[in-house]
Each structure stands twice: as C-alpha cells, then as structure tokens.
Amino acid sequence: MRYSAWNVFKEGLRGQRGWKPAWRSPNPQSSYDAIVIGGGGHGLATAYYLAKSFGITRVAVLEKSWIGGGNSGRNTTAIRSNYYYRASARMYEHSLKLYEGLSKELNYNVMFSQRGMISLAHSIHDLELVNRQMNAMRLNGVDAETLSTAEIGRRVPILDISPDARFPVLGGLIQKRAGTARHDAVVWGYARAADALGVDIIQNCEVTGFQRSPDGAVTGVETSRGPIGSRKIGVAVAGHSSRLAEMAGFRLPITSYALQAFVSEPLKPVLDTVVLSPATGVYMSQSDKGGLVIGGGLDLYPSYAQRGNMPVMLNVLGAVAAQYPSLGRVRLLRHWAGVVDVVPDSSPIIGASPVPGLFLDCGWGTGGFKAIPVGGTMLAHQLATLTPHPLAEPFSLDRFTTGALIDEAAGSGIAH
Amino acid sequence: MLQIPCPWCGPRDELEFRCGGQSHIIRPGPPEAIDDVTWGKYLSEKINPRGEHLERWQHNAGCRRWFNVARDTATHRIRVTYHMVEAAPAILPGGVAP
C-alpha cells in the first residue's frame, strides 16, 4: 500500500520527502525481444500486455520526451463506445470494458467515472440519426437510450433547451456507461505496472532511423541514445506516425492535424455528464477539480504544431456561450492542441506495415484516449504472435487497397 | 490567425480559405493498366511531412479559385503561393518533395 491514507498523512508531516519513484529510469540495453516506439498510453499499454499476457518482459518503450507528454496529456479524457459499425463497436466496447476494470488491474486509481455521454439532436434529421444510432448500438450489444428534451433539461440544467435557442434541443442519445478518466493516471498506471513486470521505460530517447537486414526486415532502431536491436518493433506515435513511416521507407494514409482543447477556471459542479453537440462539434465535461473541459473541431490544415489558431477557438467558445448562456463570462485557464493522425475513414490502422517486423498502432485520429487499453491489447498480440488480434483484423493497412473501409466519420464525433 | 496571400486577391485572413491538402498528386493511368495497390496508394497515401509542405488552398470566401501554397507544417510559415499550373518549387530542407 504505497499510497495508503496513513502514508499520505505521514508524508504530509515529513515534507513529502519519503516517496519513491513509481518506475525506474534504466539505460537502454543493446537489444530487446520487442521495442515499442512511443511512451504514451498506447505504447505503455502495449508493453504492459506484452509482459502480462504473453510473458515477454525484455521490452523497451522508447519515448522522445517524457511519457504521457503528447496526446495522452492533451486529450479531453472522454471514453465511450457509441460507434456505428460492428467492427468498431466491438473494439471500442472491449476498450470500455477494460477501462471498467482498469483501476483494479493496474492497482492504480485511474478515476474512471461512468457519468454518461449525451449526443444532442438539434433538428428532425438529427433525431432520425439518433434513433438509427441507438438501434445500431443496441444491435452491437452496446448500451444506448434516447432522451427527450425535458429529460436532457433535467440532466443538464445549464444547457439552453428553450424552443428559440440558437441550437434547439429536440432530443438526444445517451450512453450511460461512457464517461471520463484521469488521463495522467492511465499513463502512470500502465507505466508503473509495466515497469514492475520488467519493461524498460526509456525517456528522452528519440528514434532517428531503422536498422534493416538485407531482406528489408527491421533489426533495430537508431536513437538519440545509441542503437538498440530488436526484430519486433511496434510504432504507437499517433500524429508522428508518418515521420516514422518515412524513416522506414513507406507512406501512410494519414494526415496530421492540430486538435485544440480548453479548460476553464474551476467552477462549482454544474455538469455531471459529457455533452456533445454534433451541430457545432463541441463537447464538454467537468473535471473533478471543477474545470470545464472543452473540445471542438480540428484546425483543418496539416499541422505538427502543438497549438491551434484563433478561428477554431472562436467557433468552439462561441458555441459554448450560445448553448450554455450561464457560462458566457467564465474564463479559460489553459488551452492547447495535440497532433492527431487522421485517416480517410476515421478508423485506426492496426497490424502489419509494409516492412517485415515493423507493426503499427495508429490512425486513431481524435479518439485515441478511449482506445488505450484495446490499442495496447491489439498491438501486444500482434508483436507477440505475429498475427493480428481478432478485433484488429478489419483494421489492417491493406483495407485502403481492398476498399473495405470502415467509415466512422460520424462515430468519431468530430468533423474530419 | 494565418494571413494567406491569394495570388489573385492579395493577403487575406485564413477564415476566407479552405485547405485542399497535398498538391501535385499525379493520377496514375491508364485505368485499365493500374493495379489495386497503385490505385489505393493514389487515393489514400499522404506524404504528411513535418516541415515544408506543398498544398492546395481555395479562396472559398473570396475569388473561389484554387492555388498552391508552400507552407511549413511545424511553424505554419507560408513561404510562397503560386498558381495551380506552375511547377512545384524546390522544397526546403526538412520537407518531403511530392
């Protein structure tokens, strides 16, 4: 019990000097059974499941800066499985179920709060889509209910549901098992659990190239901390996937965009669920600290800058002010952007790359946080067995050749 | 806010424009001679560089015409804009040529 109430009390009296690091900072070894590039949620989860489910513990996670400093620290922490197609629904539902048990699995409180997520309908056409979505979700075994305007008004009292509202609320869809989690805790929980199983987490170690055998297969990586050998390499670097693909000599159907998010000054509790307005692309929840966490659409031009521009900011915050009039004078505390990897069909790319020994977990676009447990599960399965995980089979890279796309443009919740 | 110099209208705010993505993509052909892999790559693959990128933009709230932009995706700096029919300029180091 490292974080017991007694230890917190004791350390409070001792000036917090007795805490030990939660994971080691080893120097890289010369070779590993598997290397995972990217120390975000997906990469750390991959390493954890490699060690836990397959007993492969000679694993290194290579992170160019600090773990959880990319999109894992830049998302809006929403977790849901309200997707349309069967392949997506069963994958995201698997992730949601793993989240439901994650605090116990990792012995680390990830603060998963199933506060529900409401998608609003602003027109008759939206209502039809809400019903279609509900039916699709139920057929896929995912919980879904429709809500009337009055029910939404009771659940979200700060939302303007008056008939003359700029965005009238005609109804909505709720997934009650959806919710939010503490993003840093997910990263740190996986990191500590993976480290305890023997995984080396190597920070400040940027991959600069791949070592290849004469037949083209990867045999290791060149890094800012020297070469490291491995014949199995997983890439979980979200918006930077195209750069690693370029190093390995192939291209991906990915465009990197900046996705902005905002958090307000702390308020007393005003919102106990997640609300998405598809008309404006704006979604909002309230963190346990009281800050309103707000997300919106993409800055729609390719970008590797971890910051957004004013026009999208004005759209997002204008929509918040219009739909939640009482928040019009709330001030923002922070605003930032993450670099997201958007694919034409808004579905991830999992599994083999054109280079033998190199495997992908990318293309999650604007929705990677909710998929951390399943992304790690699928990439670990691929690395350990060299065959795709059953959930990952429809999400292979070759769907862009076969044409078997899984178009979740609506399920992604954000216009791509 | 980006300020984008439209080749016809001069510098305007990014609000007036829409980005059409990677430029200078050449359609392979003739269609009957193209295999699925080539066609799939043509439709979906992107160079997506971190650095200078040659891309198409449309001045959709202005003259509505398309043009090319050489823009750095890390700094958002626009080096040059040029007409659709012009050849691609030499790319700056760090970018990826089309």
Image (tube, rainbow, N blue to C red):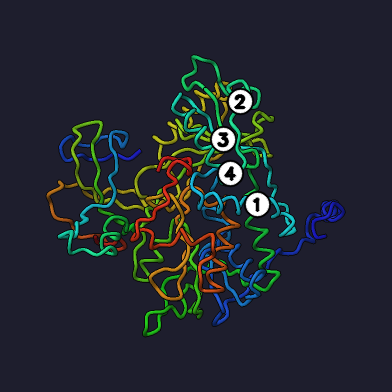
Do the residues indicated by labels 2 and 3 lie within the same chain of the protein?
Answer: yes
Question: Which label's residue is closer to the chain start, 3 or 4?
Answer: 4
Badge nearest the viewer, 2 or 3: 2
The residue that appears at 48% across and 68% down in the rendered structure is: A206
Rendered image: mark on residue A217: none
Q: Which residue is mark 1?
A: A97
For the residues bearing labels 4 and 2, Cβ distance under 8 angstroms = no
The residue that appears at 35% across and 60% down in the rendered structure is: A402
Q: What is the three-letter code of the residue carrying label 2?
A: Ile
Q: Which residue is mark 2?
A: A152
Under circle 4, the secondary element is strand
Do the residues indicated by labels 3 and 4 lie within the same chain of the protein?
Answer: yes
Q: What is the three-letter code of the residue carrying label 4?
A: Ala
Question: Which label's residue is closer to the chain start, 4 or 1?
Answer: 4
Distance of label 1 from label 2 (alpha carbons): 26 Å
Whether residue A40 is visible, yes or no, is no
Front in this rendered view, residue A250 or B40: B40
User: How busy is the neighbourhood of tag 3: few (under 14 within 10 Å), some, or many (20 plus)?
Assistant: many
When the figure is inspected, residue A330 is found, relative to residue A94, above or below; the finding is above
Do the residues indicated by labels 4 and 1 lie within the same chain of the protein?
Answer: yes
- Position of A6 with respect to A247 (left or right) is right
User: How busy is the neighbourhood of tag 4: few (under 14 within 10 Å), some, or many (20 plus)?
Assistant: many
- Quadrant occupied by the N terminus of chain B: top left
Q: Chain of mark 1?
A: A
Q: Which residue is mark 4?
A: A78
Q: Which residue is mark 3?
A: A284
Do the residues indicated by labels 4 and 2 lie within the same chain of the protein?
Answer: yes
Q: What is the three-letter code of the residue carrying label 3?
A: Met
